[in-house]
Every structure is written in C-alpha cells, then in structure tokens.
C-alpha cells in the first residue's frame, strides 16, 4: 500500500534524462538506453593505474544525473549506477581483483552532504559482484572540490598528499579495484592509486560511472 501511494506521489523518473518513465521502462527510458553516451575507449594511460573503465562519458544527461546524485540527495541512483558499473567491469575484464575499495570524501564533506556518494556506489557494485568493499583510504584534509578547478595542474596540486592508507597491512601485495564517481582529469584517482601502491599494493585498477570524453579522444 505504502509503495503504491509513494509511486503515485513520486512517479519514477529516468535516472539520466529525468523524464517520467513509462510502465515498461525501469531505471532508464528507452531513449536513454539507446542513446546514452557509452564510454567505448578506456586505454588512456592515467598515472599509476594498471587499467580502468567507465560506463558513460561525462556530458549531457549523464552529467546532470551525477550532479543530482552528488548534490541533490538522489541516493537511490547509487544502486542503479552500481548495477551498470558492475556489468561494465565484467565486460572490461576488471573483476579479477583481491580487494574492492573507493575514493573517500573528507569527513567534513560527508557531514555536510549526509552521505558519501562513492560509498553508496561501491556498496552497490560489491553487492552485484558478491564482494564486501574494504575501506583502504582516508582523506585527512578537506580540499576545495575538484569540480570547481579547471586547470589540470591545480587539480593535481589540490589532492597531492591528501589521502592516507587505512590499515596498510590489508593492502600489501593486493590487486585493488578502486571506484570513483567521475574521472575528469584523473588527478584524484591517480593520487589514490599512488597512495595505495606506496603502501604496498601490487596493482590498482579503476572503475567509474563516467569519464571526461577528452581522455578517450586523445588516444584515438
Ligand atoms: Zn531517459
């Protein structure tokens, strides 16, 4: 009963374009299933990453969807993104790892937002792949958001040395799959991978919901 009232008050919308869904549609409308900007290339060599993949390019409806997930309280997107990212990781042969982890936000940002969106994502991916995620990194300094900085060098400087390993004894010799919501310049995931490798990880791979199209154009 409650679900029916909830559905009447808040009819489900497409996770990407935010239009109301038809009865035969789930999570995404037919149009977005067909035309979403799927990331096809993932061979750009980001520093310290042994491999990576992303579901979509970070633009148009994908960008707006992720902004709702991060800043407008759309926590439920975590499980939808988790399902599609788990499928993409399987397609990209990135499921042969020893440890699943994520890029953490600073405690201050988590407090302000009420949740860590990447933790929601990693829990959903872990559920799909039958793996329990493990916290390996801590962001110990609050920094201005990367999204507000356009210059690649300033983005690198902004995250330099801000992550520390949690329980380094769990990291040594492991092949680690690191998840993040968006890879833009790669500064954040590279910094996290560097921290994990310095703590003894064998290799670090990365999976994200979306990536800046720039990186894949560059290696065509
Ligand atoms: Zn749609």
Image (spheres, grey):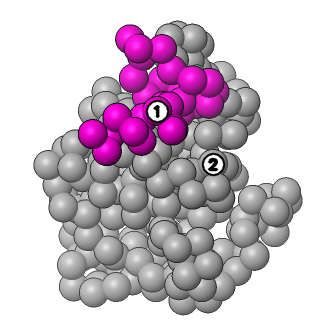
- The residue at the far left in this view is 130
Along the line of sight, the residue nearer the viewer: 5 or 158: 5
Most frequent secondary structure within the magenta stretch: loop
The reply to whether the residue tagged 2 has its Cβ within 8 angstroms of ligand 1 is no
Instruction: Give the quadrant of the C terminus.
Output: top right
N-terminal of the pair, mark 2 or mark 1, is 1
Label 1 crowd bin: few (<14), some (14–19), many (20+), radius 10 Å? few
Residue denoted by label 2: 68
- For the point 30% across and 57% down, the residue is 123
Of residues 54 and 14, which is closer to you in this image? 14
Does the segment drawn in magenta span residue 210? no
| 65 with respect to 179 (left or right) | right
Where disc 2 sits, the SS reads: helix
Is residue 128 shown to the viewer in this render?
yes
Q: Is 98 placed above or below 20 here?
A: below
Q: Position of residue 168 (x, y in %)?
A: 29, 84
Residue sitting at 21 percent across and 49 percent down?
Answer: 127
- Front-most of residues 150 and 153: 150
Residue at 46% x, 76% y is 195
Q: Position of residue 7 (x, y in %)?
A: 42, 35
Residue 87 x/y as whole percent: 31, 31
Snapshot quadrant of residue 110: bottom right
Image: 48 above or below 183? below
Camera sees residue 198: no
Label at residue 8: 1
Q: Which mark is residue 57?
A: none
Above or below, 3 relative to 111: above
Left or right of residue 143: residue 170:
left
Magenta extent: 1-28
Residue sitting at 22 percent across and 43 percent down?
128
Q: Secondary structure at mark 1?
A: helix
């Amino acid at each position: 009963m409650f679900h029916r009232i909830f559905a009447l008050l808040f009819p489900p919308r497409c996770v990407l374009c935010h239009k109301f869904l038809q009865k035969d549609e789930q999570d995404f409308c037919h149009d977005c299933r067909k035309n979403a900007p799927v990331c096809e290339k993932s061979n750009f060599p980001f520093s310290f990453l042994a491999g990576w993949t992303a579901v979509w390019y970070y633009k148009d409806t994908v960008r707006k969807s992720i902004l709702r997930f991060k800043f407008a309280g759309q926590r439920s997107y975590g499980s939808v993104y988790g399902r599609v990212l788990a499928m993409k990781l399987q397609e990209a042969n990135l499921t042969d790892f020893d440890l699943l982890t994520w890029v953490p936000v600073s405690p201050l940002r988590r407090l302000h937002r009420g949740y860590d969106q990447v933790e929601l994502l990693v829990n959903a991916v872990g559920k799909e792949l039958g793996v329990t995620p493990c916290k390996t990194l801590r962001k110990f300094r609050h920094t201005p958001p990367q999204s507000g900085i356009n210059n690649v060098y300033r983005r690198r400087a902004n995250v330099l040395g801000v992550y520390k390993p949690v329980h380094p004894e769990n990291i040594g010799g492991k092949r680690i799959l690191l998840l993040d919501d968006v890879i833009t310049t790669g500064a954040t995931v590279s910094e996290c991978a560097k921290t994990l490798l310095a703590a003894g990880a064998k290799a670090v791979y990365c999976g994200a919901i979306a990536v800046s199209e720039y990186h894949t154009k560059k290696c065509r």
